[in-house]
Amino acid sequence: MPKQYTATSVRKLVDKYFSLQWCRENIVIPIGVETNQATGSQRLTVAIGNFSYLATIGDFIKQRAGNAGLECQFIEKPAHEIQALLDQASQERLTSGDSNNLDGIEFSDDAILDALKGADEDSGTQGFDFDFDDSDEQIIEEQAFDLSSEMMGSKIQQAAAKILINAARSGVSDIHVEPRQEEYKVRVRRDGVMQNYVCMPRSAGIKLTACLKNMAQMDIAERRTSQDGKIRRSFEGQTMEFRCATAPGKFGEKMVMRFLNSNADMLSLDILITNEQVRQDFRSIINEANGIIIVSGPTGSGKSTTLASALREKDSGELNIVTAEDPIEYDLGGNIQQFPVIRAKGQTFANLLRTFLRQDPDVILIGETRDPETAESSMDAAETGHLVFTTLHANSASSSLTRLMDMEVPSYKLNASLRGVLAQRLLRKVCPECSAERPINDAESRFTGLQPGTPARFANTLNAEEKEQRKQEGTLCTRCNGTGYQGRVGTYELMKVNRNIREAIKQQKSTHEIESLAAQNGMLTLKTYAVDLIAKQLTTISELQKISNTDD
């Protein structure tokens, strides 16, 4: 919200974009226009007496603002405050807009050149030296308005802002706003596990969803179809970006927001990959001059983090490194040029890859291989002397190969270009404060392969009632809040492609056959790597059980 506004400034906005009578009838008032200093774009802030009105008038207001080249933000204010301000504004005598007299102004080519030269002379330079100020240049990245507008708005707006701030501060990756029959529930995903956050009446939940949809530039009035949007805000010098999606359900709209933490500190491979041999082998692969390297795993397994760390290591200043990402999750900085996928404008992974090949690249990152066209284009780029990184949704390193074969990538291209596949998962780290140490029993020994009696740590996970009781007693673990875990650690499976693996690919052998062959060549499986983490007391046997179902 603009920090200061007067009856005069408000009346000017009313006359320019709406009318005084319409604002009175709908309890609406525009209160200011703010400018993003970095991009030069502007946003109109409109106060509304009741957010439920947005279903009928929201689109009209956005259209009026859009016609003037403005974005639009809604805040909720008490109806009597809006009426009082409209009464004050009604005493002003203003006309909409500023009068611009263009009579006598010359628009010929010579006049334009003279104006450009005059502007250049004003800056104290002679001629055109191409040392331009880019302050007015349109940048692809969207602006991040400060959260102060929401923090100064209604209680619902304040609640929405606080939810976003809490997510950014507490390591939350996803926020779920879920409608139930009698209530709305907000749950968050922390360390890969869903946790209850807050329950509220349905009326408050509907308002919260509408408020978040407004922040994400979604259609508030549309509740029967799925929508996608993005919330981008700044707070205390930190930029927060949330990828948002809604879906109509039995009891109303469910909304999920994924936190894209571009401000996160970049972790090095030394921290991410705890096993020294796997780390050295991976470094040897990423230092190849050409070929393709695949990092595979399900959603939320840390693939983007691993690739970001690998690219940062390769950024010595001597290479041209470009990326195509959907969305851009980390600001890699340095000499790395990052490009977002924009499907609405035809900017897909495959199209960006074709563009990259005309940009003299040394290293290319394709955020995700989803289709045969992207897969084959990546292989072609790797064959022509480029080092290509990409991700793939697959359960293991060996299944990544069969996934590519299913995309009809010819086996000869795989053999010619593939250098290695790194499969990974994230396991929760056991809380060092409240966990207990005990020797593993015979059943646990058979499952893990560790010797009976090997000391291991076991999480002290509490249910909701136990958490509440411990909280009242003052004995609840402040480090993990009763979950038994804090943070996550990766388990990895690196398949280096050698002559034996290439022969297996050529013969189109099964996933299990390729995995057995890779294990004979020294590959640690995801399970074997995780067992080592258990022995080091970093994670628990129950965390291993979560990944063993798909990897056995």
Image: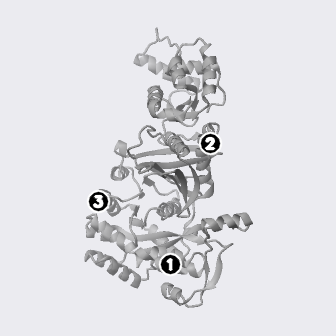
Crowd tier of the residue under label 3, counting other residues whose Cα lies within 10 Å: few below 14, some 14–19, many 20 or above: some
Q: Is residue 298 left or right of residue 38?
A: left
Q: Which residue is drawn at 44% across and 54% down?
A: 323
Residue at label 1?
529
| Label 3 with label 1: CB-CB less than 8 Å | no
Three-letter residue code for mark 3: Pro
Residue at left offset 41%, top offset 39%: 222
Mark 3 vs mark 1, CA separation in Å: 31 Å
**In terms of secondary structure, where does tag 1 sit?**
helix
Q: Mark 3 points at which residue?
A: 372
The disc at residue 158 is: 2
Q: Is residue 74 left or right of residue 386?
A: right
Disc 2 marks a residue whose amino acid type is Gln
**Is residue 483 at all visible to an observer of this figure?**
yes
Nearest to the eye among marks 2 and 1: give it.
2
Identify which residue is drawn at 60% across, 78% down.
Answer: 458
